[in-house]
Amino acid sequence: MRPLQDVRIVSLEQYGAGPFGSLHLADLGAEIIKIEDPNTGGDVGRYVPPYAEDEDSLFFEAFNRNKRSVSLDLSLPSGRSVFEDLVRVSDVVYSNLRGDVPAKLGITYADLKHLNPAIVCCSLTGFGMTGPRSAEPGYDYILQGLAGWMDLTGEPDGPPAKSGLSLVDYSGGFVAALALLAGLHAARRDGVGMDCDVSLFDTAVSMLTYPGVWHLNAGFSPVRTRNSAHPSLVPFQAFRAADAWIVVGCAKEKFWQRLTVVIDRPDLAADPRYATFADRREHAGTLVPELERIFAARPAGEWLAALGAAAIPSGPINDVAAALADPHTAARGLIAETEHPRYGTLRNLVSPVRVGDAPAEHRRAPRRGEDFDPIVRDLLGYDSVRISALNAAGAFG
């Protein structure tokens, strides 16, 4: 069995953050039942350009592999009744909506515990379900600005910049998955479920980590650094070689000593201005320009070969194509193939979460409502008469 093969999650998820969190649970074997609103055409991720046609999109495929889908209108009593039957036979209700919406929809633990006392209700929201911002919509780009990330990103003389990836969304998804599993563990141990109140804001602020702790305790004010330099370790940054950029990181004193050998500069190793981390940070204004001049004299490939032979942390600055073509990507099995009725053989990126030795099996993301029969007929046991009545009442859109 896959590690989470005995876990069933009813998910009111959409777009990026929520589906990203449950994607890893699905890859680990959990049954993720996506509830898609027929009034809006389901998950908005189905329509994200540029690679989108009808209700198929490569964006949606990236976040919804190994899941199941059923269209259900929770605004109607008929749809709500089906949802409640799913709660009765499931372990978790998972959502990523605005902070005030779970209570309005009636999907908190207080709303559902009479159906299933052990149900875990995990809500990933922009700002949490409490606090002055709880009713505000939260998006990655907004959170990167609000939590101080953009102020820290970019060149010192440039404008604030966001990360090239939606890292608040993705980190929030991981945090939600962790909270969900912790809640599920406690519910199975104690027989009592709970709410898991996870937010993108909490995630982004907590990820300020040591610069935040430095500020809280020593008044430290982070500043942007040139060429993505580490705020305290020197040298640890991007350097321009003769033909391309590379990253070199001396995260330990031994790496600095090795680097002076590789660049054939024993005088730098002997210079008291550069003897320790603190010394090199203090005199970075003279050391870094000298290192830049040295690295610019030879091609990146030559430097990386020499640095690698000396076991100094280093690497190329790849574009996306090069990262996906790296032999280690293939060796780690990070790309899976599934068959899709529109795209044919579809290549996707698998979860980095690895547990045990059971081989992973993957299937493409579901089309909207594709799993009606397995969910409604087989799992819930509805007969044709009941399905017809629910259809007439608009339960399935």
Image (spheres, rainbow, N blue to C red):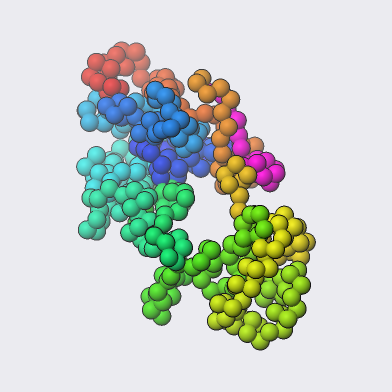
Residue at screen point 72% across, 84% down:
270
Q: Residue at x 47, y 37 (%)?
A: 63
Where residue 271 sits, quadrant-wise, is bottom right
Quadrant containing the N terminus is top right
Q: Is residue 140 above or below residue 279?
A: above
Residue 329 among magenta residues:
yes
- Is 205 included in the stretch rendered in magenta? no
Name the residue at 57% across, 73% down.
233
110 to 69, vertically: above or below: below
Q: Which residues are magenta?
A: 324-340
Give how far across and how far down residue 131 sits, in percent: 24, 58
Residue 301 locus on image (x, y percent): 72, 54
Q: Nearer the viewer, residue 167 or 116?
A: 167
In the shown orientation, is residue 98 left or right of residue 169? left
The residue lying furthest to the bottom in this view is 272
Residue 42 is at least partly visible in this image: yes
Decide if residue 203 is in sight here: no
Horizontal relation, residue 269 to residue 378: left or right: right
Where does the C terminus fall, quadrant-wise?
top left
